[in-house]
Image (cartoon, rainbow, N blue to C red):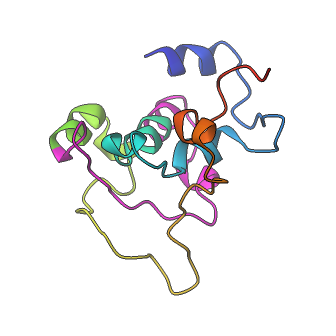
């Protein structure tokens, strides 16, 4: 997995973009359609990469609980295949899908957008600014 290679090669897992968003912020954010088809996969993949590289997932999920969100391209079977052989590293492996908030204080952790068409097409801001 490319993320694991990058982390093991010295990539800064605490890096932030020009807007101050960390890699974890982006991994755990819930994006609007069409990104919603992957559910919580991007966060689960990030957690897996961190865990197998020796990091404690809870250090990166501070203030955010993990809620499984399965979309058209991601389901519980995919989650189990991701963690196969490393289940013991996943603190939420035995937790079934939870659609409710984790606490009264926590928001749904939705990705905030300005509603612009450009941002809807590129919510992470990967495309170069003109």
- Would residue 97 be found to the left or right of residue 17 on screen? left
Query: What residue span does the magenta drawing correspond to?
Result: 47-76
Evaluate whether residue 85 shows in this view: no
Which residue is the extreme one toward the bottom?
104
Q: Quadrant of residue 68?
A: bottom left
Picture residue at 54% right of the left edge, 13% below the top? 5
Q: Is residue 56 magenta?
A: yes
- Would residue 33 be found to the left or right of residue 60 on screen? left
Which residue is the extreme one toward the left?
77
Examine the rendered structure and indicate whether residue 17 appears above or below residue 31.
above
Evaluate whether residue 38 shows in this view: yes
Give the percent coordinates (x, y) of residue 125.
67, 32
Picture residue at 50% right of the left edge, 36% below the top? 46
Examine the rendered structure and indicate whether residue 101 appears above or below residue 19.
below
Which residue is the extreme one toward the front?
117
Q: Main secondary structure of the magenta part?
A: loop
Q: Between residues 41 and 130, which one lies in front from this camera angle?
A: 130
- Would residue 55 be found to the left or right of residue 92 on screen? right
Examine the rendered structure and indicate whether residue 103 appears above or below residue 57.
below
- Would residue 72 be found to the left or right of residue 104 on screen? left
Pick the quarter of the image with the C terminus. Answer: top right
Picture residue at 74% right of the left edge, 38% below the top? 14
Give the percent coordinates (x, y) of residue 42.
44, 38
Q: Is residue 113 magenta?
A: no
Give the percent coordinates (x, y) of residue 111.
57, 55
Pick the quarter of the image with the N terminus. Answer: top left
Give the percent coordinates (x, y) of residue 114.
67, 54
Picture residue at 41% right of the left edge, 40% below the top? 35
Q: How many marks?
A: 0
């Amino acid at each position: 997995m490319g993320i694991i290679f990058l982390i093991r090669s010295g990539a800064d897992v605490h890096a932030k973009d020009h807007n101050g968003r960390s890699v974890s912020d982006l991994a755990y954010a819930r994006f609007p359609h069409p990104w919603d088809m992957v559910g919580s996969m991007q966060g689960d993949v990030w957690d897996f990469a961190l865990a197998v590289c020796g990091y404690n997932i809870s250090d990166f999920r501070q203030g955010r609980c993990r809620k499984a969100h399965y979309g058209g391209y991601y389901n519980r079977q995919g989650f189990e295949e991701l963690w196969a052989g490393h289940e013991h590293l996943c603190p939420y492996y035995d937790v079934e899908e939870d659609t409710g908030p984790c606490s009264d204080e926590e928001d749904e952790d939705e990705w905030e957008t300005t509603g612009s068409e450009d941002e809807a097409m590129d919510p992470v801001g990967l495309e170069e600014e003109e």
